[in-house]
Image (cartoon, rainbow, N blue to C red):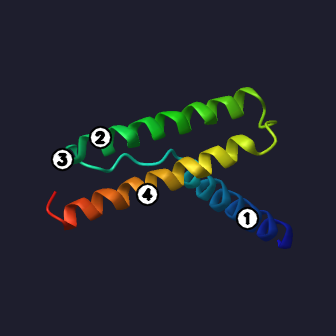
Amino acid sequence: MMIKKDMLIGTALGLILGCSGAVFAQAPAVDIGNRHGNLRAAQQYISSAWQKISQAQTDNNDQLGGHAQRAKDYLTQANEELRLAANVANEHGR
């Protein structure tokens, strides 16, 4: 009985970790509206670059020395900055 309980807990934890990993593995969102066309286009390029890097990681069995992941982290940060820029423009009625 104890073995089944341990197995059930292990399976549940594995599913939780797997699902949380899938959430973090998604490309940055394109969430700036058409009102700010240039910022939205930049977000689209960021999302595309992020996806290309993910493909490169897969193709190279994640053996890129951590540099690809670092690039993805920077893209995520840039995407957030674009969102903040759009928010500021909105606050100023632009």
Gap between marks 1 and 2 measured at Cα: 50 Å
Residue in the image at 74% along x and 43% along y: 67
Q: Residue furthest top?
A: 59
The x, y position of residue 48, in whole percent, is 48, 33
Nearer the observer: mark 3 or 2; the answer is 2
**Residue carrying label 2:** 38
Nearest to N terminus: mark 1 or mark 2: 1
The x, y position of residue 17, in whole percent, is 67, 60
**Residue carrying label 4:** 81
For label 4, the SS is helix
Nearest to N terminus: mark 4 or mark 3: 3
> Relative to 16, does residue 72 appear above or below in the rendering?
above
| Crowding near the residue tagged with mark 1, few <14, some 14–19, many ≥20 C-alpha atoms within 10 Å | few
**Residue carrying label 1:** 8
Gap between marks 4 and 3 measured at Cα: 17 Å
Q: Amino acid at mark 2?
A: Asn
Instruction: In this rendered view, identify the residue nearer to me: 80 or 57.
Output: 80
Q: Amino acid at mark 3?
A: Arg
Instruction: In this rendered view, identify the residue nearer to me: 1 or 72.
Output: 72
**Residue carrying label 3:** 35
The x, y position of residue 5, in whole percent, is 77, 70
| Crowding near the residue tagged with mark 3, few <14, some 14–19, many ≥20 C-alpha atoms within 10 Å | few
Nearer the observer: mark 1 or 2; the answer is 2
Q: Amino acid at mark 4?
A: Glu
Residue in the image at 60% along x and 45% along y: 72
Nearest to N terminus: mark 2 or mark 4: 2
| Left or right placement of residue 18 versus residue 30 in this view | right
